[in-house]
Image (cartoon, rainbow, N blue to C red):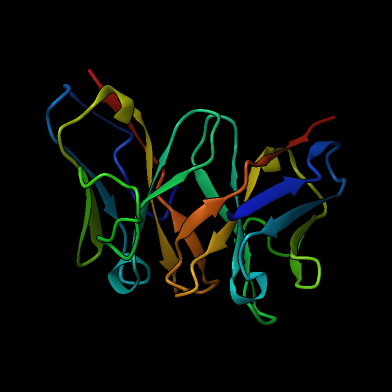
């Protein structure tokens, strides 16, 4: 059971837009920056979003991030077949035994 | 170019030990916190441990008391000593470089090293 809650899967057709949610609490998302990662099978995760809504250099502006209270959202516009991957949110948790936490991951299927 | 290269994975029996290493290059190692993140087969990302730029270390509850993280700035290497290994520790272990802002995100990851705990 992950500390951060993501939907196990989302799907949409090419060209459409999709959002992936990440729900936490005041000890993590509510008081910390959120990051998002994309992962293809057999490869290391790739940073998509940091500090809630910032994109690293080289990341398409089709990817966006937002945060409100204890939840965060990854948005992807103009879906492409190459976006089919697993997506994870992550942050730091300040509760007893502080440490990093990730969501359980969301499998994006581009129909 | 930033590079992180893990080594030390392999097959170990339950109760055994392994030491993972992550040799880095392309950045000022001593200025960055480092983390170990693992991924069990078919499962999601699981943060394991982190070491700050000083002596601070952090552990997930699942490994506390069994794993020890350390760094050697003279060798640009971070280590993860894993003792009393369990079947549920079976995973690909990634080392990751934390951003200098300490906002807990990882732009650079190693390729991972597989640890299999089985008799």
Where residue A90 appears, as percent x and y from the top left, is 41, 56
- From what the image shows, is residue A94 above or below residue A49? below
Q: Nearer the viewer, residue B24 or B52?
A: B24
Where residue B108 appears, as percent x and y from the top left, is 53, 54
Tell how many labels: 0
Relative side of B35 to A18, left or right? right
Q: Residue furthest bottom?
A: B54
Where residue B59 appears, as percent x and y from the top left, is 63, 65
Relative side of A61 to B28, left or right? left
Where residue B98 appears, as percent x and y from the top left, is 53, 65
Quarter occupied by residue A9: top left
Q: Nearer the viewer, residue B45 or A45?
A: A45
**Quadrant where the C terminus of chain B is found in the figure:** top right
Tell me what residue is drawn at x 31 percent, y 59 percent.
A24
- From what the image shows, is residue B62 above or below residue B89? below
Relative side of A6 to A111, left or right? right
**Quadrant where the N terminus of chain B is found in the figure:** bottom right
Tell me what residue is drawn at x 72 percent, y 47 percent.
B6
Tell me what residue is drawn at x 65 percent, y 79 percent.
B56
Relative side of A8 to B39, left or right? left
Residue B24 visible in the snapshot: yes
Q: Residue furthest front?
A: B1
Quarter occupied by residue B9: top right
């Amino acid at each position: 059971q992950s500390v951060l809650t993501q939907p196990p899967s989302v799907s949409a057709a090419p060209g459409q837009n999709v959002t992936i949610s990440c729900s936490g609490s005041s000890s993590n998302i509510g008081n910390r920056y959120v990051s998002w990662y994309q992962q293809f099978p057999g490869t290391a995760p790739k940073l998509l979003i940091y500090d809630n809504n910032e994109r690293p250099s080289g990341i398409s502006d089709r990817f966006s991030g937002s945060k409100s209270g204890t939840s965060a959202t990854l948005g992807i516009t103009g879906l492409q077949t190459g976006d089919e991957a697993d997506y994870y949110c992550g942050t730091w948790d300040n509760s007893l035994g502080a440490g990093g936490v990730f969501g359980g991951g969301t499998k994006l299927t581009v129909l | 170019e930033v590079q992180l290269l893990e080594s030390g994975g392999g097959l170990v029996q339950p109760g055994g030990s392994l030491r993972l290493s992550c040799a880095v290059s392309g950045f000022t190692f001593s200025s960055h916190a480092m983390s170990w993140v693992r991924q069990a087969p078919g499962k999601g990302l699981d943060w394991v441990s982190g070491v700050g730029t000083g002596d601070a270390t952090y552990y997930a509850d699942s490994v506390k008391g069994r794993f020890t993280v350390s760094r050697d700035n003279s060798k640009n290497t971070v280590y993860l000593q894993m003792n009393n290994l369990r079947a549920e520790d079976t995973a690909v272990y990634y080392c990751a470089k934390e951003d200098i802002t300490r906002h807990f995100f990882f732009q650079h990851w190693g390729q991972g090293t597989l640890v299999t705990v089985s008799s």
